[in-house]
Image (tube, helix red, strand yellow):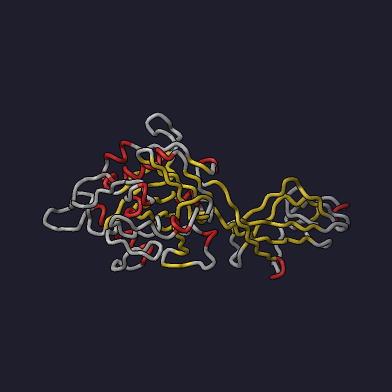
Amino acid sequence: MSFKRLDPEDFLISADSITAGAWTSNAPTLSTFFTSSTQEGGSSGNYYVNILDEDPDTSSTASIQFSAAFGNSDGSGSLLYDPGILGKSPTSTIYGQFQNIILGDENNSFEFGGITPVTQSVYALSIARSRYKGNMFLGTMDLTLTKGGTTIKLTDNSNDVSTVVFNEAGRVYQIVSGSQGSAVGSGDSATDAVANGMTISGSYGLFLPDIGTILLNASALDLASGYGGIALNTGNASNTSDNNNRKIFQAVKEGLAFSLNSQENITSDFIFCRARNAEYNYSENPSFVSGSAGEVLYTSFINSPQTFITSVGLYNDANELLAVAKLSKPLKKDFTKEALVRVKLDF
């Protein structure tokens, strides 16, 4: 074994962006949606519902793709924790959680397309961390929601904006009616129509690629089909168990299509390990030397040694082994040869 200190020019850092389908086996579109009766029936079912690609009751390979939750600023849509304490329920907890994550302040309200809905109700689709990897790839979301024969197709407006908006959760884009990152028209992109006393509800939600969250504006979805919604009928007028997370799940399930890609930045550290002609020609292997003095076993190896490099170890200054790179086959080395081994570390 021989050691050599690496020089600064022996290091090179490179970064590559890799995109793939967000769902199981890197599929770009998810078309089957199932829930777990065990999870729904447990305590967590009051807060969110996990959506899987296969029926967990019949398939051992079913895996969570994303989760759906409903939040309301007043705690409506679910039973109170304590009848004597108004406004505190699972839906208020969900609302406060995303309020802190996205807005960074529990006193702020969500704005959708520049509009602050009077009723602060949101649906949150949280993509599993292992699915969106680094972040959700802009312009690849196609979310189809269907209820009672009415269908809307939603995407982010990343292809229609020139200035990126940031908040506590990173980049923020509006969710609009359209496909593959583009709105279908100005009437559907920023606000819904105002007619018959309907109030402007704003965009359909917020697309937050850096935290893998799609925050849907319940007020916009609750509108009738003639005003851009699907009449999802969010139960948020009282503290009753309205199972709103199930309502958005059913709308996604009936829509039959949820397309999304992931994006991941892979940083590679290239280390160039050089063996010059006069280096690494002798070995301390017992087959090479003999005796306590470490004499070369064969006299022919004194002036014309021959070794085979099989691996490269990377050590720190404390002589601690940090990484090992194995060569695909032994590399022959003698005084007439020089070698360059490129080690690649991905992280």
| Residue that protrudes farthest toward the bottom in the picture | 8
Instruction: Say above or below: 284 vs 10.
Output: above
Residue nearest the viewer, comparing 230 with 273: 230
Q: Position of residue 58 (x, y in %)?
A: 40, 29
Q: What residue appears at the point 83 percent right and 59 percent down from the top-left corner? A: 338
Residue nearest the viewer, comparing 223 with 326: 223
Residue nearest the viewer, comparing 164 with 105: 164
Q: Position of residue 57 (x, y in %)?
A: 37, 31
Q: Quadrant of residue 312?
A: bottom right
Q: Quadrant of residue 172?
A: bottom left
Residue 20 in sight here: yes
Q: Quadrant of residue 189?
A: bottom left
Q: In the figure, is residue 145 to the left or right of 182? A: left
Q: What residue appears at the point 29 percent right and 44 percent down from the top-left corner? A: 45
Residue nearest the viewer, comparing 221 with 282: 221
Q: What residue appears at the point 37 percent right and 56 percent down from the top-left corner? A: 193
Q: In the figure, is residue 5 to the left or right of 157? A: right
Q: What residue appears at the point 58 percent right and 61 percent down from the top-left corner? A: 320
Q: In the figure, is residue 35 to the left or right of 184? A: left
